Amino acid sequence: SNRSSVSIHSQQPLKPQETYKTANTVLSVDHCDLKSSVNDSNGKLRRVNPSFGLLAIMALIAICGLLLLGHLPSAFSLQSGLKSGAGFLSQTPSSTGLQDFFQLYQPISFASSGDDNCNVEILLMDHVFGVSYGAPFVGDYEPPNCDFDTVRINLTVTSRGKQYDRLALMYLGDNEVFRTSTAEPTTNGIVWTYIKEMSQYNSLWKSPQKLIFDLGNIINDVYTGSFNATLTAHFSTGQNVKTADMILPISAKKSASNSSSAFQLPTDNTTVMYKIPAAASRAVVSISACGQSEEEFWWSNVFSEDTQDFGSTVGGLYGYTPFREVQLYIDGILAGLVWPFPVIFTGGVAPGFWRPVVGTDAFDLRQPEIDISPFLPMIQDGKQHSFEIRVTGLDVSSDGSATFAHTVGSYWVVTGNIFIYIDNDSSAAKATITRDNNAPTVNAPLPVFSVTRNLVHNETGGNDSLSYSVVVKRVFRATSSLYSWSQTLSFSNHGVLNQQGYSQVNRQLTTGNNTITKLGDTPISHSLEFQYPLVVNATYGITSNGMTIDSWMKRGLDFEATGGLGISTYTLTSGPSYLHTTQSGTAKYKSITGGKSSSWGDTSNIFASQMNGRSYHRSVHAVNGTVVHDTDHKGKTSPSSPQELGDTGRDSVRAILGKGPGALINHVEGTDRFVYRLGGMFSDLTIYTTDQALNVHRLVVCSRSEAFCRFLSNVPNESKQAHEFEIKDEHPRVVEGMIRSFYGLHYDINRSDPQMCPMLFNVKVYSLADKFEVEYLKIQAKLAFVTLAQENWNSDEFLTAAFEAYKTTPKSDRGLRDVVVAVCQKYRKDLREKKGFEKLLEETPGLATDVVLLSHRWLPQPASARVRIVQSFSCLSCFARWQIEVGLAEYFTSCPFCRDDKVGAF
């Protein structure tokens, strides 16, 4: 048939006949023709002229549709191989009654920002992914007949029923250009939309491409949810940013067979060969890599020798430690590194965390970049050169030394793209002509590894608890006469499994700095600094009729970039950018044997970014699948009581936990929002302090405070006590801070309106949180106190706060006391000279004794003389609880996994 300049033709993947009969795919239908209109180069709606044969097919389908459905649908799909009762769902994005799921990100305009020379929107895909493993959507893309420099896509998906979260990859030819994942649907149905900047791939969009969208899914009697996906692209002008002139894929190159081109490691050989143009002036490699199956929760993996430590209780664990490094090699020479962000998909840890706000980057997996410009003089000789991506974990030997394992578990999904910028007059081309074609100077020393491990047995000889840690530091530099690429990376993961493996906690932090410098008389540098903090605590157990998960997490993604050439696949912009995002909360999951699974969750989300000269901030608090607060006025909130979440996709607790078949922003939310939320709307409880009345909500208060929950549960609802409560023996700002925290706001109002020294304020907050049993607030106050105490230990404020910490907390609560003791011991020589320190020791019961006991860890003492004891530990940073036989010298002041500066609380 005759094609216009803008069309998408849906192709049936070339599969064997028996596979074809069971595959749920869309037959050969031209969506642009059937949709009847697209925008022309002037922004006007234009009808695509179909051929006579296609008109006949359209007429036949239309008649069948009218006879069977009584109306003509907007698009036609012929489905094959569906079993009766499979729960197949075909919805449009405008379906009513669907709950909105979303990811927090800076809004992107889907309209033209320049003149009207090009303002075209094209339907790329309208497809239902039912039984779709090995059967991706395949279509032919042809560019619009107008000049454009800006491309953005809109992916809208609807789903209903029960289904796993699924990974999806979009390709233009053999180049992966978008990696996303699905939300887990509900019985009533969900919908989500994500708009993505795609101008970085302009050189691909400028020419016809085979578009492949691979979303593997299954439909059966249990998993009934299909994914109805609509993908459109908007082409316009006005961005005026230079993008790569050539993009070469590092992939399996399977588009010719209508297949996904992703590598699977460790089994595949990822090596590809290319000739790099002599006129290339700059080259950057983007890497898309994420773990699946045994490697989905790589950050919670243990040492390989410990994978069967709890086999008799919880089954096998996954190994190669919780450290992963993605490596890029050019001609066998290490060219750069990626330490991956720990993505958590919507079925991970506990599904209640991610409804309706999904995890960071779950809808758009970020692609880190490695600048290979220092290698250009070496690879611009007109010969073939190899590019290879590897993923490795660690092996830990019996003597405690760590080395690269050169492999990982099964499996990682990996691709890459080489972005090449052409400049015929470039210094790189001149360097090639002058035979500056030697390999760059690469300084890549092996990382500095530090690992610990402690396996504890119970009275019967069985394994009771395992604590381990991995700390890695690495530097890398590649330098030629033109460019220098440097990386400084740091990683730490402290893990504890206790209760015979039923409880696991991991605290991880990845930080890094990547810098590319163009050398010369006046060097020009562009840098990216990032950090990925993560704390996850998950405890699961077996009940008489099923299994449960209780979990807590806090995670973040922060970066600051100066910008550079082109649009970054990592920052998604070309200029300077900044991002701070955190997610924290609690969630529970319950699976009933022979029945439905269910989940509850309470998650706070904070997002702040600056890009393209615009700032954006959004804070969302969701409880049990309902948004109860959203600073974006367009967001939907509900004052009704949130209900238990429905069935979840991963009905195996081990699958949810990945065990088989997160610089903090200094923003304080505005007083107007605080007053609005506590101003009486739907309030059913008033808390009185000495100077104000705080109108709150019992549902919120009871979900945060165990003490409030017990009290209000034992008083009649009609009584005055159920609706009025006095806290007049505490400082009013401290009470107000606690109430603010109940609503997801930062508790430390003392920062903006100081009424006492910061250390003292946090001590009082800690004490109040202990009184009302608000564990998360104790953690926040303790962490703030740790920072302040280390920074201001030589001030009178520390002496005052130390006295208050011992005065207001019981002897059994070591949270603040051990911080005070550790600081006193660390700076004991200087503090002895300070006026007031001796008085502090004299007037603070127990402090002097604690300091003396702590000093034993510095006394030379043979191991045989140490007192061995069995002690119970409870870590307020991660909520871990365990018993362990310890020596006083080794474990007195630190949690086995979160012992930064030896001031962990336990």
Image: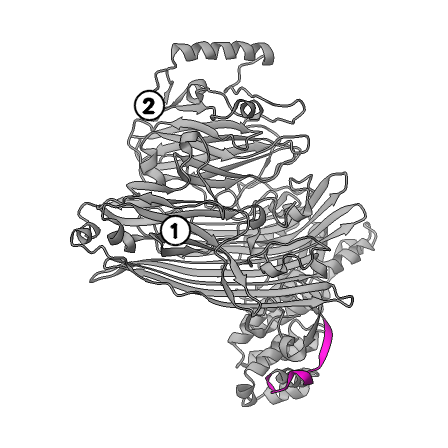
SS under mark 1: strand
Q: Single out the mark in the foreground, 2 or 1.
A: 1
Q: Position of residue 767 (x, y in %)?
A: 68, 69
Q: How is the image coloured?
A: one colour
Residue kind at label 1, given as amino acid type: Glu
Q: Relative to 243, is 317 above or below?
A: below
Residue kind at label 2, given as amino acid type: Ser
Residue 458 lies in the magenta stretch: no
Q: Which residues are magenta?
A: 858-871
Q: Relative to 268, is 302 above or below?
A: below
Q: Residues within 10 Å of mark 1 (few under 14, many from 20)?
A: many
SS under mark 2: loop
Horizontal arrangement in the rendering, residue 327 relative to residue 469 (left or right):
left
Q: Position of residue 344 (x, y in %)?
A: 56, 49
Quarter holding the C terminus is bottom right
Q: Position of residue 174 (x, y in %)?
A: 39, 36
Res 399 visible: yes
Residues 407 and 196: in front is 407
Q: Which residue: 47% across, 47% down?
A: 289
Q: Relative to 23, is 903 above or below?
A: below
Return the residue at label 2: 5
Horizontal arrangement in the rendering, residue 135 relative to residue 718 (left or right):
left
Q: Are marks 2 and 1 in contact (CB under 8 Å)?
A: no
Q: Which residue: 19% across, 54% down?
A: 431
| Quadrant housing residue 835 | bottom right
Quarter holding the N terminus is top left
Q: Which mark is residue 723?
A: none
Q: Farthest residue to the left: give it.
A: 434
Q: Residues within 10 Å of mark 2 (few under 14, many from 20)?
A: some
Q: Position of residue 857 (x, y in %)?
A: 62, 82
The tag earlier along the polypeptide, 2 or 1, is 2
Return the residue at label 1: 369
